[in-house]
């Protein structure tokens, strides 16, 4: 088979044109109207860094986005993805000099560990939303955390929700 034509016979003209000296969409043979639309839509963009226009932002917000499922992200996931958690984690690592507090191993795969479990703090303070979690000072207290390596963290009594359900049920009176 000649080069440039795929084995399955489908003509991928856009791919070949892209690799035959075309540097950007402005080099391609588009009508003037289409080029103006492209310029307007890509306003403020450069290379890989995409800046959303207000119109495109509105299309992607919550219920306007076709992938939106009603805000089903769990509270735990919201906390772990937050900037406050990353600051808390970094503060603990820096305080402990990136060293496991149990086996004194330096570096490697380190985990921040709540001394008083995060699930217990959330249950005691009756935190149900992420905004309530942000206001809870006990959750973000650096003195409530220690640095552990992965192996030592697995040995703790609350790793992977081992004892959380029993403790939380006792707190809630169930």
Image: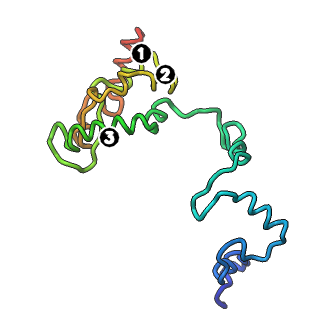
Residue picked out by circle 2: 132
Secondary structure of residue under mark 1 = loop
Secondary structure of residue under mark 3 = helix
Secondary structure of residue under mark 2 = helix
Residue picked out by circle 3: 90
The residue lying toward the viewer, choosing from 28 and 6, is: 28
Whole-angstrom CA distance, mark 1 to mark 3, is 24 Å
Residue depicted at x 65% and y 51% = 52
Please report whichever mark, 1 or 3, sits nearer to the chain's N-terminal start. Answer: 3
Residue picked out by circle 1: 125
Q: In the picture provided, is 59 more to the left or to the right than 137?
A: right
Q: Nearer the viewer, mark 2 or mark 1?
A: 2
Q: Position of residue 30 (x, y in %)?
A: 80, 73
Residue depicted at x 68% and y 84% = 5
Q: Position of residue 19 (x, y in %)?
A: 63, 80
Whole-angstrom CA distance, mark 2 to mark 1, is 9 Å
């Amino acid at each position: 088979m000649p080069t440039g034509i795929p084995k399955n016979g489908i003509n991928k003209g856009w791919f070949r044109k892209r690799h035959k000296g075309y540097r950007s969409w402005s080099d391609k043979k588009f009508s003037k109207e289409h080029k103006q639309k492209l310029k307007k839509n890509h306003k403020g963009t450069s290379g890989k860094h995409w800046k959303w226009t207000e119109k495109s932002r509105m299309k992607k917000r919550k219920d306007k986005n076709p992938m939106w499922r009603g805000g089903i992200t769990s509270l735990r996931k919201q906390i772990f993805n937050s900037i406050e958690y990353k600051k808390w984690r970094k503060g603990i690592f820096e305080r402990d000099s990136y060293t496991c507090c149990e086996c004194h191993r330096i570096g490697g795969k380190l985990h921040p560990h709540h001394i008083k479990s995060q699930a217990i703090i959330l249950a005691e303070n009756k935190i149900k939303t992420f905004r309530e979690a942000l206001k809870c000072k006990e959750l973000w207290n650096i003195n409530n955390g220690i640095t552990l390596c992965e192996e030592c963290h697995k040995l703790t009594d609350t790793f992977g929700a081992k004892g959380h359900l029993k403790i939380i049920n006792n707190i809630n009176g169930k």
